[in-house]
Image (tube, rainbow, N blue to C red):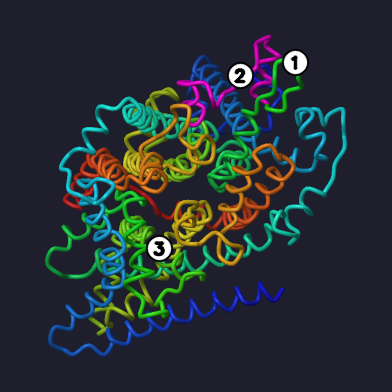
Amino acid sequence: MSTVPVENRKDLLPEVKDDATQGRSTQQKRVKQKLTSRRATAAAIIIAVIWTIPTFGLLISSFRPESNIKGNGWWNVVTDRQFTLENYADVLSPGGSQSPNLLSYFVNSLAIVIPGTIFTLVLGSMAAYMFAWGRFRGKDGLFIFVFALQIVPLQMALIPLLQLFTKVLAIGDFQLLPSGTYAQLWVAHTIFGLPLAIFLLHNFIAEIPGEVIEAARVDGAGHSIIFWRIIVPLATPALASFGIFQFLWLWNDLLVALVFSGGGADVAPITQRLAELQGSRGGEWQRLTAGAFVSIVVPLAVFFGLQRYFVRGLLAGGLKG
Amino acid sequence: MEEIADKGIQVVVGLAIFAAIIGLIMLVVDRAPKSGREKIQVAAFLAPALVLLAVGLVFPALQTSYLSLTNRDGDFVGLENFAWLFTQPEALVTLRNTLIWVVLVPLLASSIGLAYAVFIDRARGEKALKALVFMPMAISFVGAGVIWRFVYAYKGAGQDQIGLLNQVLVWLGQEPRQFLLDAPANTFFLIAVMIWIQTGFAMVVLSAAIKGIPTEIVEAARLDGASAWQQFRNVTIPTIRGSLIVVVTTITIGTLKVFDIVRTMTAGQYETSVVANEMYTQAFRAGEPGRGAALALVLFLMVLPVVVYNARLLRKQKEIR
């Protein structure tokens, strides 16, 4: 890959800034800068290629007939152009128990991730607002404690939490958060997402000019009005960018699902099903390739669809140190 | 279809209950009595997040800490589990691997992400180039596991290779290798997957930070005749230091907690286990909750310095303000 002549890739070269400073720089310096940027471009292209090829290979493979996937490498499509949608039909269809039945699990993933993200954002920003602008004793200490909770490994909390859901929050057969529904997953994800949400949103909300909030206070606005009318609209970029990350993290999750979903097509997310297929059918590449792509369609759509908003949010100061 | 409708109803009901709870909290905030109003409002905003964290993280973590001092029958055994952890070869391999992970992933993911962000800054097609490297971030760990197991796939020397990496070896005149089976190199092949995922996160955040550098500073450096490298070292790095620290610490914490990649690709066999995976294996598979809890505590102690550093930095920033 590194042999690709870089000069021919004009489309990927950084634009040479045509400003006043350039006229003042010497010929020698300009050559040196150009060389550096050319080398930088080459490095960037190599990184981009390495980062893309594994996914690209899997995408190509998912459209190849079973015998071809197992018989030779996906790069052979250059000479052997056979494509099929059968792999996708196979993994999505709700066939017997042998079928991957991914459509059901796909719906589960959405049903887990969307509320899980909303709950974390609302509760996280409410707490972040108080940590930034509330007046109470022990604020800094409590905030650092919440931040420190990020390091409590998920595994440390799982078993006591499962017991809490099934035994403590239950009266007889009635469970406050019934098993076999999404409720346990929503609450668990919210708990595990809160420390980071509070920390990142606090950093943003603390940057909001104090005069704005002071002015509202003087006008007699209470915390709920300030929060919903001033903080939330001004923090939208940060909420959006954290929301996207949280969405992706929840979609990524396997461990929490393993513990709280029970594993059936009623509740379990698509990652859990895909992990099962990897374990039991590790060599069934026609199913794994198509299944992997079904599982990454939504996060990719979210990312590409909201990318502009996401980047704008970051530029407005989200996550700035 | 009926199944999907049922799941949709569950989500709507869940969201409605959540909205009702938040509405109730806001009502309390608005109707708070004049005396002690501020205190009640602060408490109402913080309560949902703090109660969830206390019940779902703090209390379970304490319970797990006690567990680390007990054996599989629940009897108190003092530090026996920790003695096992620091003397038995299998446990020592796990600790060694975790150290390798936690050094390599944040270092390489942040450096590659930063380099890439600098290289493509203001390049034509910057958005597309960014999307290519960020894309793995949107892919679930389980999906990434499928993608990379396919890259590492092994076939005997005489057969057609279906894994890209082995095909490259064959093209170079080498024997195909079992990348995931041969220790100790296999750990590095797992680490590559994590770097592949995390680089995009580092790149997006750092790129935004780079774009936030005031143009006057860059222009001033350029007028002073600073070379590209000097600009990078003396202008870019110090200005984005805050974001850089956020990125490194976030990836460090994520790496220490990594579980899915090891679980789905090797299940921790062939000397690839890491602390987070071994904790799951000991606690949920081997019936040794005490050892699992001890591993969790070790994880906690490893992240502690990172968090302390971050917390001190945070305090310093507040003082400056």
Q: Label 1 neighbourhood size at 10 Å, few (<14), some (14-19), many (20+)? A: few
The residues tagged by marks 3 and 1 sit, at their Cα atoms, a distance apart of 50 Å
Seen from the viewer's position, the closer of residues A273 and A106 is A273
Which of discs 3 and 1 lies nearer the camera? The answer is: 1
Q: Label 3, secondary structure: give it.
A: helix
At horizontal 22% and vertical 36% (from top left) the residue drawn is B82
- Image coords of residue A85 (percent x, y): 82, 49
Q: Can you identify the residue that label 2 sits on? A: B177
Image mark 3: chain: A
**Is label 3 in contact with label 1 (beta carbons under 8 Å)?**
no
Per the image, label 1 sits on a secondary structure element best described as loop
Determine the CA span between mark 2 and mark 1. Answer: 13 Å
Q: Which residue is mark 1?
A: B158
Residue position marked by numbered label 3 in the rendering? A188
Q: Residues within 10 Å of mark 3 (few under 14, many from 20)?
A: many
Q: Is residue B114 left or right of residue A125?
A: right
Q: Which residues are magenta?
A: B164-190
